Image (cartoon, rainbow, N blue to C red):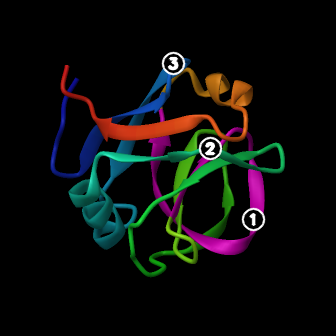
Amino acid sequence: MSNSVSKKQLILEIREKAKISCDLKRHLSPRTVGTIMRSLPLEGHAHLLGKSIVYFETSVDSGTERARTEFKKGDVAFLPSSGSICFFISDAVFGKPMTPIGKLNKNIDALKDIKSGDVLCLYEDTD
């Protein structure tokens, strides 16, 4: 387990259900990733967007950076309009541009069991 300046290892926890290893990658969107890192830990209620995106709203305020609309399973993105951090359960094309910020590493399918209202926590991996 290594943390470098360009990659930060985080844990996405579905409270009382699962923990998913997650990397934020500074090279994808340096300003946004920096803002999120300074805001950790983050916590919010899970919401579902269709069958491909799980997200939670945060108070992070960062504009769009290197935006794109196509994402792959396991991608992590930031939606500036609502300050939401989005996790892709499957490949998706999204109507609004999002800022790519990282990748889920393993146990991605745990997100498929999320119910609206589950609590999501994103924090640094200190192990």
- Please tell me in which quadrant of the rendered image residue 119 appears: top right
Q: Are marks 2 and 3 in contact (CB under 8 Å)?
A: no
Residue 31's place in the image compared with 47, above or below, is below
User: Which of marks 3 and 2 precedes in the sequence?
Assistant: 3
Name the disc covering residue 16, or none: 3
| In-front residue for pair 64/70 | 64
Q: Which residue position holds label 1?
A: 94
- Please tell me in which quadrant of the rendered image residue 26 appears: bottom left
Identity of the amino acid at label 3?
Glu
Q: Is residue 17 magenta?
A: no
Left or right: 33 with respect to 112?
A: left
User: Which of marks 1 and 2 precedes in the sequence?
Assistant: 2
Q: Which residue position holds label 2?
A: 46
Residue 56's place in the image compared with 16, above or below, is below
| In-front residue for pair 89/26 | 89
State the extent of the magenta-drawn residues as a range: 84-104
Identity of the amino acid at label 1?
Phe
**Nearer the observer, disc 2 or disc 1?**
2
User: Which of marks 3 and 1 precedes in the sequence?
Assistant: 3
Element type at marker 2?
loop
Residue 109's place in the image compared with 122, above or below, is above
Q: Residue at x 70, y 75 (%)?
A: 96
Alpha carbon separation for disc pair 1 and 3: 29 Å
Q: Are marks 1 and 3 in contact (CB under 8 Å)?
A: no
Q: Residues within 10 Å of mark 2 (few under 14, many from 20)?
A: many
Left or right: 17 with respect to 19?
A: right
Name the disc covering residue 35, or none: none
Q: Which residue lies furthest to the front in this view?
A: 117
